[in-house]
Image (spheres, rainbow, N blue to C red):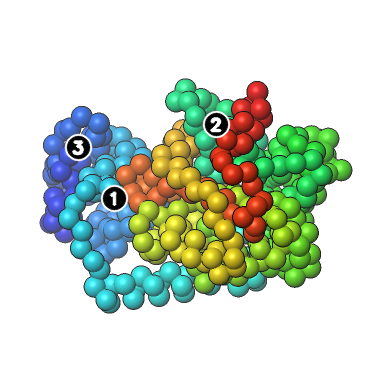
């Protein structure tokens, strides 16, 4: 217990954490507090305790995944949330700059971990998205939107919030009949199909996932829009070289996180070249509050290899090099936390099916991933940005009124 005591006594102040060692010894940290969970964990061996001391972020994940750390009271969502709630990103503490060495270490980790050359990009996508459509069906909404929903009312279902998200984004695209739309990172086709249903537009969705591609094409056929919605397995860089200036509108939802910091300039140059002279793009991405950082070891190893969550500053700075005008920015602060809690609840409800499909260790890994992500959006430094870009200052109306009008029409 002595190896964990310094760390836990420093972090856990509010809420109660009881730790049970392999020999049965118990120690309590923190004090009960309103809104903070009470959690009890038990270690089955000392290796699990050492893992956490040596590398708290990935050590705790792997100890939980391997059954060396068990939850006796509460679940992994409660445990991760308790730790994050005691050290919230926006706690208002006195700020100190990192040392020069600390900054350089973060910069190197970010760049090396997210180079994402084209061949590596395909491998990274396959690691996460080609593990099987059946898994995603179990915890996503009916339309299989694997990105932050839009909670315009607190009593919405996940399905309603995802419909609202698509309408919210469609309104910002300022769609008109006959336009050609590109969906970069189209997932299972839900956004592309919705855009074609809302307006008489042609949509090309591109992905690097073979599993997503096959299902997206099936869904377009079933929705009766296959004549106007096509899907292709192609990298955005290759498409930009093949079809410059083809698209009036570009939408990209939840894909920019996979681009990698060294490729930001390339991404925006490709997007600009793909658009017409008066083209408009809506980028929906997880974003980092504050300055640029680095991807944690657990996420790099198990969830999104090559992934990187961008700060708003570096996203906008990269876009400026391609003469893209930032015409609107919206920060969704807590919407993804609400979405993730829904995914987590559905994952727990389908435990038996997921375990049968993927195994116990995968199930615990997936729960840790969703719990950690939720805590990052509730108490950590993560949010979502919707950034609208235009190539011409004349491409959009002078005021934002058109967005609300279109959104109400789409939802009505």
**Residue 257 seen anywhere in this rendered image of the structure:** yes
Left or right: 78, with 34 as reference point = right
Tell me, yes or no, whether the two marked residues, 2 and 1, touch with CB atoms within 8 Å: no
Query: Regarding mark 3 in the picture, which secondary structure is present there?
Result: strand
Task: Name the residue located 41 percent from the left edge and 42 percent from the top edge.
Answer: 333
Q: In the displayed structure, would residue 302 be above or below residue 187?
A: below
> Sequence-wise, which precedes: disc 2 or disc 3?
3
The number of discs equals 3
Q: Secondary structure at mark 1?
A: loop
Frontmost of labels 2 and 3 is: 2
Q: Is residue 270 left or right of residue 47?
A: right
**Which is nearer the eye, 106 or 1?**
106
Position above or below: 117 against 246: below
Distance from Cα at disc 2 to Cα at disc 1: 26 Å
Q: Position of residue 310 (x, y in %)?
A: 46, 60
Q: Could you say where residue 359 lies in the image, as x and y percent from the top left?
A: 52, 47
The numbered dot on residue 8 is none
Find the residue positioned furthest to the right: 227
Going from N to C along the chain, the mark reached first, 1 or 3, is 3
Q: Residue at x 18, y 46 (%)?
A: 12
Identity of the residue drawn at 59% across and 54% down: 389
Find residue 15 and name its label.
3
Which is more N-terminal, label 1 or label 2?
A: 1
Task: Name the residue at 33% across, 49% down.
Answer: 380
Mark 1 highlights which residue? 89
Give neighbour class at mark 3: few <14, some 14-19, many 20+ (Cα, 10 Å): many
Quadrant of the drawing holding the C terminus = top right
SS of the residue under disc 2: helix
| Residue 294 at x, y percent in the picture | 39, 64
Which label is found at residue 161? Answer: 2
Q: CA distance from mark 1 to mark 3?
A: 18 Å
């Amino acid at each position: 217990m002595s190896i964990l005591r310094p760390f836990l006594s420093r972090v856990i102040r509010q809420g109660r954490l009881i730790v049970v060692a392999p020999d049965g010894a118990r120690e309590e940290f923190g004090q009960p507090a309103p809104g903070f969970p009470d959690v009890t964990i038990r270690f089955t061996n000392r290796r699990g305790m050492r893992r956490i001391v040596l590398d708290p972020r990935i050590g705790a994940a792997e100890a939980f995944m391997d059954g060396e750390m068990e939850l006796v009271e509460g679940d992994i969502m409660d445990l991760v949330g308790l730790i994050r709630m005691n050290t919230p990103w926006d706690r208002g503490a006195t700020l100190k700059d990192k040392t020069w060495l600390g900054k350089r270490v973060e910069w190197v980790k970010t760049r090396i971990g997210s180079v994402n050359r084209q061949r590596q990009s395909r491998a990274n996508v396959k690691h996460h998205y080609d593990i099987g459509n059946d898994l995603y069906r179990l915890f996503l909404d009916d339309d299989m939107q694997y990105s932050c929903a839009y909670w315009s009312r607190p009593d919405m279902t996940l399905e309603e919030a995802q419909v609202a998200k698509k309408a919210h984004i469609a309104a910002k695209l300022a769609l008109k009949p006959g336009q050609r739309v590109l969906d970069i990172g189209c997932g299972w086709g839900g956004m592309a199909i919705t855009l074609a249903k809302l307006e008489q537009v042609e949509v090309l969705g591109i992905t690097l996932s073979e599993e997503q591609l096959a299902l997206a094409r099936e869904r377009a056929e079933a929705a009766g829009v296959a004549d106007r919605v096509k899907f292709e397995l192609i990298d955005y860089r290759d498409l930009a070289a093949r079809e410059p200036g083809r698209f009036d509108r570009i939408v990209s939802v939840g894909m920019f996180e996979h681009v990698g910091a060294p490729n930001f300039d390339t991404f925006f140059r490709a997007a600009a070249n793909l658009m017409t002279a008066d083209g408009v793009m809506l980028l929906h991405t997880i974003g980092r509050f504050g300055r640029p950082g680095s991807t944690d070891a657990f996420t790099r190893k198990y969830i999104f290899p090559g992934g990187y969550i961008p700060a708003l500053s570096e996203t906008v700075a990269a876009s400026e090099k391609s003469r893209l005008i930032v015409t609107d920015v919206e920060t969704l602060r807590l919407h993804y936390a609400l979405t993730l809690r829904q995914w987590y609840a559905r994952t727990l409800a389908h435990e038996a099916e997921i375990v049968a499909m993927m195994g116990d260790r995968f199930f615990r890994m997936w729960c840790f991933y969703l719990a950690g992500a939720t805590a990052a959006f509730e108490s950590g430094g993560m949010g979502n940005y919707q950034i609208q870009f235009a190539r011409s200052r004349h491409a959009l109306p002078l005021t934002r009124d058109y967005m609300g009008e279109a959104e109400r029409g789409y939802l009505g």
